[in-house]
Image (tube, rainbow, N blue to C red):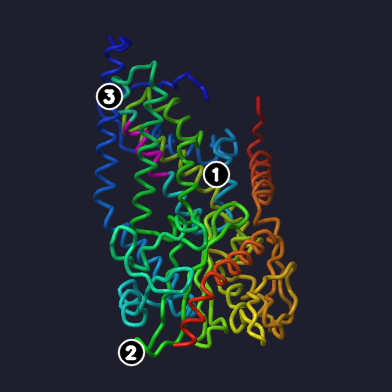
Amino acid sequence: MSTETAEVKETKVSEALFSKRRKKLISDPLIDDNPITIQVLGICSALAVTTQMQPTLVMAISVIFVMVMANLTISLLRNTIPSRVRIIVQLAVVASLVTLVNEILKAFAYDMYKELSVFVGLIITNCIVMGRLEAFALGNKPYDSVLDGFGSALGYSWIILAVAFFRELLGSGSVFGVEIYDGISSLFGGEFSLATNGLMVSPVGAFIILGLIIWVQRTKTGYVEH
Amino acid sequence: MQQSNGYIITFSVILTVVLGLLLSGTSQLLGPIQKKAVELDTKKQILGAVLESSELSAMKAEEILEFYDNRISSKVVDYEGNEIEKDEDGNEIIAENVDVAKNYKLAPEKRKYPVFIFHQEGNEDDAEAIIVQLYGAGLWDEIWGFLALDTDLNTIEGVTFGHKGETPGLGARITEGSVQNRYQGKKIFDDSGEFRSVDMQKGEGKDYSGEDHKVDGLSGATITANGVNAMLENYLKAYKSYFEKRQKS
């Protein structure tokens, strides 16, 4: 985790709500500076939750909520946070938000809570969250920080959703619980059945899918690690 | 100024208090809703032993609670099969609130065993199935379940299993309907009346339809299957005296 804080040039008076610079805050982490495929952060949860689409979607929404709110809070407090205890302060804010998400899930989506509460708790240790707080929210205005958090969380979300799509399709033969494989075989009169791949259900499958995604992306963008 | 110890301590105290208030406030606010969600979940699991999961998922929350009230009566028995109504402190015991995990830590003779009787609407004596609670250890963490027996107290009408942390796609498959349906029609006593329980076998894909005490296993999840077997054996054995008493009356 870098301790340097990227200072975005302060602009005067009124900047458009979605100016070019602000759009970049959201779009950069989607591909060019993706937290998972480029920065290789947050791998742990990308492997753990992605066996099925539905829990992955809930996880993605939770991460978006936590990142946006944490970035906002830290950015609002950025001039008052004593730098010697800033990591603990960030941790306390993130942990509180995560607990909040967990409590809300428990009250309104108990089935999801049963499945996900372990992983939701682990958002606290997701390096992407802390990384953005350290690198961005501490040195930038609230609105920019919200956009930055949203962008990074979106970059994280689409990758884990893509991984989950392939893992659920190849591992369980379904997407969002809809049986695709059964549908295909009945389309051909049930003469053959497609076999599911058990490897995709285990974390090893996620490694393989993630590796392939990173490979494809880096081939296209020509990104090389320095 | 911001670097002084006094400032840091004051800041930390304020932050702690604010976050603490926020969290305890949420917990207070959501507490009753969460309690209802847990209650609904328990009742769903109990009903899952006698209803098809498709039937259950088609019902709304209020319908499930109403159905439960109309069709299930519950009581708590001890190891000898005697009904117990009050605990050591004289408080009334409610079967739905018995903490099976807590009881599991006690010796089998000291545990409380909830029994749920699935009966015709409006007539509690006209029982259709007897549902008992199960609890044990899987590969990674606790597993639990409910098992419904036919009124002959021998034939299994249905089971539901739950787990906390079994491997998705492997041990976690015990929560799938297709796995739980394998138990339907199996018997826990043999022809001579000896207790046999039902054992999930190693390996998957064999046909055990002719066997009363065996069900097809879970490929790649033998340890979870062993946990399920142990859970069934331990708890059905513990309920045995109750079954015998009920049979006589």
The chain ID associated with circle 3 is B
- Which residues are drawn in magenta? A64-73
- The three-letter amino acid code for the residue at tag 2 is Asn
Residue in front for this viewpoint, A93 or B86: B86
User: In the image, A28: left or right of B232?
Assistant: left
The chain ID associated with circle 2 is B
Q: Residue B187, located in which quarter of the rendered image?
A: bottom right
- The three-letter amino acid code for the residue at tag 1 is Ser
Of helix, strand and loop, which one carries label 1? helix
Q: Residue at x 34, y 21 (%)?
A: A10
Q: Which residue is mark 3?
A: B13
Q: Which mark is residue B123?
A: 2
- The three-letter amino acid code for the residue at tag 3 is Val
**N-terminal of the two: label 3 or label 2?**
3
Q: Looking at the picture, do discs 1 and 3 lie on one chain?
A: no
Indicate yes or no whether the magenta region holds residue A71: yes
Residue in front for this viewpoint, B159 or A207: B159
Q: Residue at x 56, y 60 (%)?
A: B136
Q: Residue at x 58, y 40 (%)?
A: A43
Q: Is residue B16 above or below residue B233?
A: above
The chain ID associated with circle 1 is A
Give x and y (percent) for residue B158: 53, 79
Q: Residue B25, located in which quarter of the rendered image?
A: top left
- Tell me the quarter of the image containing the N terminus of chain B: top left
Is the magenta region chiefly helix, strand or loop?
A: helix
Front tag of 1 and 3: 3
Are there few (<14), some (14-19), or many (20+) residues within 10 Å of tag 2? few
Q: Which residue is mark 1?
A: A45
